[in-house]
Image (cartoon, coloured by chain):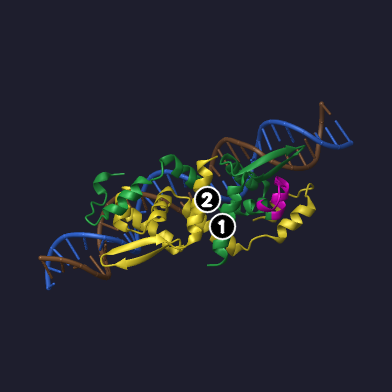
Chain colours: A green, B yellow, C brown, D blue
DNA sequence: CCTATGCATGAACAATCATTCAAGTATTCA
DNA sequence: TGAATACTTGAATGATTGTTCATGCATAGG
C-alpha cells in the first residue's frame, strides 16, 4: 500500500479512531478469520457443511446427496480439512467426515437464522 | 452437472442420506448464505466490519484507521451495503456506517472466539 | 495375488474478484 | 457562486479460486 495515496483526511474523529485502533486485530487473526469465512463462502462447501451439521457422513454418501462427482466433493473436503472445519475418521474403505467443533455449528446456524428472516 | 459422471456408489447408507436429503437447503438459501460468508471472507472487509463492531464510523475515519485509500474502502463498503451487512446514514458531508443487525455481530464474534482458542 | 471400490490429488482452464486509476456527484463554506 | 471536501463509481487489470479430467493410492474381497 502506498502511504502517499492514503486519505490525508481532516475530518477524523479522534476519540473514536483512537479507541478503534487500540482494538485492531492482529494480522494473523484477520487472516485466520477470513480464511474460515472464505471457506464458508462457497455454495458447494456450504452444502457439505450443512449435511455434516445433521450427521457424520462418508464421502460417497455426500456425493449421492449432493449429486456431485466424488472428485469435486473430495477437493472441497480437503479445503475444509486443512482449515480444521471438519474432521475425518477412517473405517475400512470409507472415510467418515463430521464438523470439527461446536463453533462451526453455531456460525452456520447463526448465518441461517440471518438469511431466513431478513 | 453431468449425472453420468456422478458417483454410482454401492456404499450408500440409506437411513442417513434420506434424512439428510429431507433437510436440504433451497438453492436460494444456499446462495444468500454463501454470498454473505464470502463477503466476510475478505481481510479488508473483515477489518472494516470489525471496526464497525466497535463504533459507527465515517468513511474517512475508516480510511485512517485501516490505512487504506478511500476508493478501496468505498468499494468494499458497497459490497457490504448491497448484502445488507452494513447500513449508512448521511450527515453533512460525511457518511456514517454501522453494522446492519445483531446477527452480523454474533457471527463475527463467534468466528473470533473460534480463531482465538483453537 | 488381482481386481474393484472408495477416496485423494496434480495440472489446466474458466470464471470470479479485489484493487487501482480516473472521473463524477453532492455538500459545505467562504 | 466557486472552490474544497467527503464520498461514489466505472473500467481495466492482475491475482485467486472452483471445477474437471486424469491418474494414483490403499483397503477389501475373491
Is A62 a magenta residue?
A: yes
Q: Are marks 1 and 2 in contact (CB under 8 Å)?
A: yes
Going 49% across and 46% down the picture, which residue do you hit? A33
State how far apart marks 1 and 2 are (Cα): 9 Å
Relative to A83, B16 lies left or right: right
Magenta stretch: give its range. A53-65
Q: Chain of mark 2?
A: B
Q: Chain of mark 1?
A: A
| Label 1: element kind | helix
Relative to A110, A52 lies left or right: right
Of the pair A59 and B44, the residue shown nearer to us: B44
Of the pair D9 and D6, the residue shown nearer to us: D6
For label 2, the crowd category at 10 Å Cα-Cα, with few meaning under 14, some 14 to 19 and many 20 or more, is: some
Splitting the image into 4 quarters, where does residue A113 fall? bottom right
Going 57% across and 39% down the picture, which residue do you hit? A82
Q: Which percent across, then down, holds residue A88?
A: 67, 40
Circle 1 residue:
A110
Circle 2 residue:
B110
Is B21 a magenta residue?
A: no
Amino acid at each position: 500500500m502506498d502511504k502517499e495515496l492514503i486519505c490525508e483526511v481532516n475530518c477524523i474523529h479522534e476519540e473514536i479512531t483512537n479507541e478503534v485502533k487500540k482494538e485492531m486485530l492482529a494480522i494473523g487473526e484477520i487472516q485466520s478469520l477470513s480464511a474460515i469465512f472464505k471457506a464458508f463462502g462457497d455454495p458447494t462447501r456450504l452444502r457439505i457443511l450443512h449435511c455434516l451439521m445433521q450427521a457424520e457422513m462418508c464421502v460417497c454418501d455426500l456425493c449421492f446427496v449432493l449429486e456431485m462427482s466424488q472428485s469435486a466433493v473430495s477437493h472441497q473436503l480437503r479445503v475444509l480439512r486443512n482449515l480444521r472445519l471438519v474432521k475425518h475418521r477412517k473405517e475400512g474403505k470409507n472415510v467418515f467426515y463430521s464438523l470439527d467443533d461446536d463453533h462451526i455449528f453455531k456460525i452456520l446456524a447463526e448465518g441461517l437464522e440471518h438469511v431466513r428472516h431478513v
